[in-house]
Amino acid sequence: MDRENSFFQTIDCLEQTLLIFAKSMATTLSEMKIFQIGFSKCGTCSLFHFFKKNGISSVHWKTEKNENLAIRALENRESDKKFFNGLDYVFYSDMVYMDEKGVIFLYERFEEIYADYPDSKFIFNTRNMDDWIRSEWKHCGVEDGVPWRNIDRLQKILKLDEPLTLRFLRQHYLNHTANVRKFFKDKTDQLLIFKLGENTGEDIANFVTEYDFEDKEFPHANRTDQFFILEKPEGK
């Protein structure tokens, strides 16, 4: 009888341990988020589609309620809330906003995002600097029948000519890259440096082990060369 009671007590103890572990894992997953903190035109949209096709709740630039992600985050911060309070996503990408008043690169505030969500992981997507600047220069489209170039919009906002705007982008690239590397030098398990054209979906799956990735093929979405280039002067 004593052996029988001891056996059932052991089973009960194991069940309690497993229950505590399961609750702990659920809490960890609910608190962990994944933030893209690299540059636009570096596979940002492709990252979004990669996570989304693997069933991971994701948001890119705008929420399901048509709210710009960066603006919504700043409104939360102004109300003394965490950046992404009220947003129930796991993966966050393209945290930028641009209008006549200025440019918001919310990903630059990754240290504050980390302070809000210290158990999260961060993907610094990047590429060769000159290739990135060239892609930013080429990025264009049509809105309400009116063609636009991203570089023209940026020039107007910064009140700079094109050479100085390109210099601004170059300095932004160098500063942000240095800041990310410095901050995460002792947190390497929470940062993936994802180089466009070099890293793969397999690298992401090996980094975000908390989730299962059934489709590890990395997509190529929203490529600049898929758009009509308005003009291309010599040397660009």
Image (cartoon, helix red, strand yellow):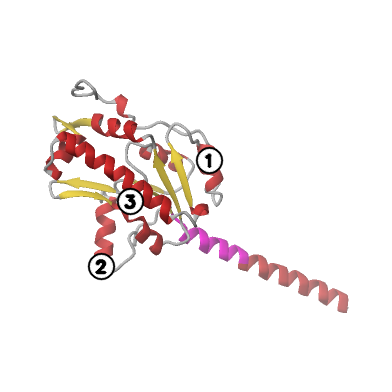
- The earlier-in-sequence mark between 1 and 2 is 2
Residue 161, picture quadrant: top left
Question: Does the magenta run of residues contain 198?
Answer: no
Q: Residue beneath label 3, please?
A: 107
Query: Is 229 in front, or is 233?
Result: 233
Query: Is 2 in front, or is 117?
Result: 117
- The earlier-in-sequence mark between 1 and 3 is 3
Percent across and percent down for residue 96 are 27, 47
Q: Is residue 63 above or below residue 86?
A: above
Percent across and percent down for residue 120 are 46, 57
- The earlier-in-sequence mark between 2 and 3 is 2
Q: Is residue 91 visible?
A: no
- Check the picture and name the quadrant holding the N terminus: bottom right
- At x 34%, y 29%, the residue is 223
Q: Which residues are magenta?
A: 21-33
Q: Residue furthest bottom?
A: 2
Percent across and percent down for residue 177 are 37, 46
Q: Main secondary structure of the magenta part?
A: helix
Q: Secondary structure at mark 1?
A: helix
Q: Residue beneath label 2, please?
A: 79
Q: Secondary structure at mark 2?
A: loop
Query: Is 43 in front, or is 2?
Result: 43
Percent across and percent down for residue 100 are 12, 46
Q: Residue beneath label 1, please?
A: 203
- Check the picture and name the quadrant holding the C terminus: top left
Amino acid tagged 1: Asp
